[in-house]
Image (spheres, grey):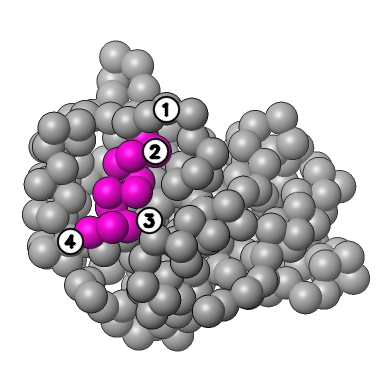
Amino acid sequence: MIIDNYTDIHSHLLFGLDDGPRDLEESIILLKMARDEGIRTQFLTPHYGPESGYTPDAQKIRENFEILKARARIEVPEMTLLLGSELYCAPNQVIGRVERGEALSMANTSYLLLEFNEWGPYRQTAEHITKSMLFLRHTNWRLILAHAERYRDFKGKQSLYRDLVSGGVYLQINAYDLMDQPDDWVRENTRWLVQNRLAHFIGTDAHRLKKRTPVMRSGVDYLYQHCDEAYADALVKGNADKLIAGERVPLSY
Ligand SMILES: [Fe+2]
C-alpha cells in the first residue's frame, strides 16, 4: 500500500497560462495543498488547443515551469514537478501541434493527455471520442483520455470504454470523482471504471484556489478500500512511474 507518495498526472497548477493560478504565489499555495493530499510527483498540464481557447506559447510554458520549480525547491522540497499538456483533441491537428513543438507530451515521453468537449452545445459524443482516440492509435504516440469518467454521453454506452482500452487507449480519472463528486452518474461511472480495472492513471485536474483545488486522498482511500492492492498501487503511482520512465503501461490487469 502506498501512503503519501501519489502521482497526479493532470493539473493546471502552473501559473499564468490557462485557467489555472494567476501568479506564482497562487501556484505555491496550491502545490502545498497537493502535498498535503499526499502527492509527491505533480504533473503540470496546461490546456492547449485553439478550439478550447488556450494556446500558451511553449517557450513561456517552459519559462514559467523553471520559475515554479526554483521556488518549489524551497517551499515544497519533497515534491517533484513534471511538465506536460492537456491537449484538446482535434484528431487531424493535435499530433502535428506536438510534433512541431507547439504543445508538450508528458514529461518528454511518447504519452499524450487528450481532452474533448464535455459541456454545452459542442459537447462531443462517446462515439466521436472513441473513434477519434482509436484513429490516433495509428500513430506512434501513446494516448491517455483525460477525466474519462466525466463525459456524460458515455451513459448507457459504457462498453465504449472497453473498446477504447482494448484498442490501446489509457484512461485517466479524477480522484475527486470517486468520493466527493455530487453528480450521482459521474461518481458511479468513476467507480465502475475502477471496479472493472479500466482506469490506468489518477489525477486531480486541480485549477486554482477558486476552481477545483487539489483532491487526492479521498479517492485513494476509496481505491484501497474497494480494489485489490496491486491495482490501487498501479493507479496511484506504479503506472505513472512507468510513464515517466517511458515504459509501456499495461492496458489490462
Ligand atoms: Fe484538465
Q: Secondary structure at mark 2?
A: helix
Say which of 109 and 217 sits in front: 217
Marks 1 and 3, how far apart at CA: 18 Å
In contact (CB < 8 Å): disc 2 and disc 1: yes
Check disc 2 and report the residue beneath it.
Answer: 187
Check disc 1 and report the residue beneath it.
Answer: 183
Q: Which is more foreground, mark 3 or mark 2?
A: 2
Is tag 3's residue or tag 2's residue first in the polypeptide sequence?
3
Q: Amino acid at mark 2?
A: Arg
Say which of 245 and 8 sits in front: 8
Residue at 68 percent across and 65 percent down: it is 38
Q: Which is more foreground, mark 1 or mark 4?
A: 1
User: Which disc number belongs to residue 165?
Assistant: 4
Q: Position of residue 165 (x, y in %)?
A: 17, 61
Query: What stretch of residues is rendered in magenta?
Result: 186-196
Residue at 62 percent across and 37 percent down: it is 212
- Magenta stretch contains residue 187: yes
**Residue 21 position (above or below residue 100):** above
Which residue lies most toward the top here? 121
Q: Which is more foreground, mark 2 or mark 4?
A: 2
User: Which disc number belongs to residue 123?
Assistant: none
User: Which disc number belongs to residue 172?
Assistant: 3
Marks 2 and 4, how far apart at CA: 20 Å
Residue at 13 percent across and 32 percent down: it is 156
Is tag 3's residue or tag 4's residue first in the polypeptide sequence?
4
**Residue 126 position (above or below residue 231):** above
Q: Secondary structure at mark 3?
A: strand
Q: Amino acid at mark 4?
A: Val
